[in-house]
Image (cartoon, rainbow, N blue to C red):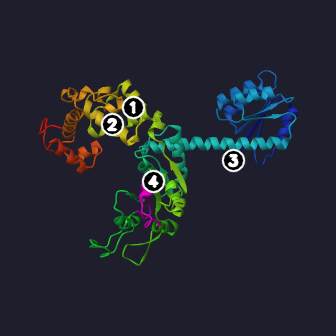
């Protein structure tokens, strides 16, 4: 391991000699300079981990040197030495970015303590810079946009946690990207070549969730016509993402706890012990800690899954990311639909930043999908946005059939008829594709189309104005 370099700057030869005699040359690479100019040359050619400089020197003094050193190496910790206990000079040095100061005469052991602190600080800064760079490269590849401080903190924690097999709990409101974050952790882990299996605990009926997780034997229950492996078996060697873990029943939680503790479980209807090697990442938009306090979630399971806790901020608390997110989603939409990337009018960006985004990043993506569909031009203008983003009634862009109608229900229906007609046309009348664009379940879209009198394979509304 390379020894850290400590550069000592003082115009007095006796002071420089005392430094080299008192510091441990086995631990540090020691260098001295008789003035700021000589120190600058050393920093430019060799570099240092810490600089210790006297303030009172002929020619260029230590305060000027402090600023010059930071121009060469902005992160260099500089310890200044002040004579006669000049507090005012020390304060001025700290304001200009000094790491710490010592007053003459100082004890050599005191200097070594300050130098060691400075080296640790330097290493921490370098590690943070390295992590920030790694996270930036990795998250760009994983589709995560997160330059806001709260997101950067979450991403750095994810990068630190990923190499281990410790359980991770991701908390955040709906639409904050917990599933994308779980995949990001998986891709950074040593399990990246293994499977990533995702299960939404709230989307599966309680009586079926155990079978989905652990599998079942033939005849274990009505409809179990053949044996089936569960998600823990499918995720073996990889990562299992359990979304909305807070909705898991209390009866099933002890079985999950057993797997987390020793990797053992039983299939439904079997007495044969199964083993799995899975890293579990959980997520919830509910306050699991409060559920545990009120007896709605097992505390021992909560403590187990809460080993590494990552909280994702809502979009309204990271508005500085909205511009990058808009650019990302518009590029994604344009590439998918093989069209030109639309520009964004300034008033549109202002409206997007000012909106509260209760549906977070997912809602932003859906709004942009809808806006590109409605505008169908080279620029997104305010007329393209949903009325709730503008705090105003429906825009006249949806057509006179909606804008000229006074009754809210009639206007809403007229808008929906035009919106879903365009949506179907854009998706080549594929209900599945249209449902994905609208962010709706396919069955929900079928019901909508039926209520509006729209046929999936029709070019135009079948029912026209059919009342409210």
Res 390 → quadrant:
top left
Pointer 1: what residue? 352
| Number of other residues with Cα within 10 Å of mark 3, as a class: few under 14, some 14 to 19, many 20 or more | few
| Number of other residues with Cα within 10 Å of mark 2, as a class: few under 14, some 14 to 19, many 20 or more | many
Q: Which residues are magenta?
A: 235-253
Marks 4 and 1 sit apart, C-alpha to C-alpha, by 27 Å
Q: Earlier in the sequence, mark 1 or mark 2?
A: 1
Q: Position of residue 455 (x, y in %)?
A: 14, 44
Circle 1 SS class: helix
Pointer 4: what residue? 283
Pointer 2: what residue? 367
Q: Position of residue 275 (x, y in %)?
A: 45, 71
Callout 1–callout 2 Cβ contact below 8 Å: yes
Tell me, yes or no, if residue 208 can be seen here: yes
Q: Position of residue 330 (x, y in %)?
A: 34, 35
Question: Looking at the figure, which quarter contains the C terminus?
Answer: top left
| Number of other residues with Cα within 10 Å of mark 1, as a class: few under 14, some 14 to 19, many 20 or more | many
């Amino acid at each position: 391991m390379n020894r850290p370099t400590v550069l000592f700057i003082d115009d007095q030869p006796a002071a420089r000699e005392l430094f080299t005699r008192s510091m441990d040359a086995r631990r540090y690479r020691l260098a001295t300079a008789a003035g700021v100019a000589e120190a600058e040359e050393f920093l430019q050619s060799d570099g240092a981990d810490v600089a210790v400089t006297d303030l009172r020197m002929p020619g260029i003094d230590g305060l000027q040197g402090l600023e010059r050193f930071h121009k060469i190496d902005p992160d260099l910790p500089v310890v200044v030495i002040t004579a006669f206990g000049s507090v005012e000079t020390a304060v001025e040095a700290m304001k200009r970015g000094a790491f710490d100061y010592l007053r003459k005469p100082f004890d050599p052991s005191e200097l070594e303590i300050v130098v060691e602190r400075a080296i640790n600080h330097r290493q921490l800064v370098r590690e943070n810079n390295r992590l920030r760079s790694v996270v930036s490269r990795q998250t760009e590849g994983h589709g995560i946009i997160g330059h806001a401080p709260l997101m950067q903190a979450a991403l750095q924690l994810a990068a630190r946690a990923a190499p281990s097999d410790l359980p991770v709990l991701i908390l955040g409101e709906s639409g904050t990207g917990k599933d994308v974050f779980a995949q990001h952790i998986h891709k950074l882990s040593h399990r990246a070549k293994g499977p990533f299996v995702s299960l939404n605990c709230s989307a599966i009926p309680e009586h079926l969730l155990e079978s989905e997780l652990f599998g079942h034997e033939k005849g274990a229950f009505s409809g179990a016509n053949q044996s089936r492996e569960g998600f823990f078996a499918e995720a073996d060697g990889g990562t299992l993402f359990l979304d909305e873990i807070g909705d898991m029943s209390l009866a099933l939680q002890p079985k999950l706890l057993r797997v987390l503790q020793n990797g053992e479980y039983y299939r439904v209807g079997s007495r044969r012990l199964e083993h799995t090697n899975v890293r579990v990442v959980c997520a919830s938009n509910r306050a699991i800690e409060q559920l545990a306090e009120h007896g709605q979630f097992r505390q021992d399971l909560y403590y187990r899954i809460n080993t590494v806790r990552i909280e994702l901020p809502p979009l309204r608390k990271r508005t500085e990311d909205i511009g990058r997110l808009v650019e990302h989603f518009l590029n994604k939409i344009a590439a998918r639909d093989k069209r030109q990337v639309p520009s964004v009018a300034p008033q549109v960006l202002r409206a997007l930043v000012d909106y509260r985004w209760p549906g977070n990043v997912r809602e932003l993506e859906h709004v942009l999908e809808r806006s590109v569909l409605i505008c169908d031009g080279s620029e997104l203008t305010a007329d393209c946005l949903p009325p709730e983003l503008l705090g105003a009634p429906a825009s006249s862009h949806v057509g006179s059939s909606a804008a000229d109608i006074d009754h809210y229900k009639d206007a809403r229906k007229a808008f929906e008829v035009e919106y879903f007609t365009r949506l179907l046309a854009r998706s080549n009348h594929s209900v599945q594709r249209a449902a994905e664009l609208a962010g709706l379940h396919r069955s929900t879209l079928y019901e909508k189309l039926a209520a509006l009198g729209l046929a999936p394979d029709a070019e135009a509304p079948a029912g026209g104005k059919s009342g409210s």
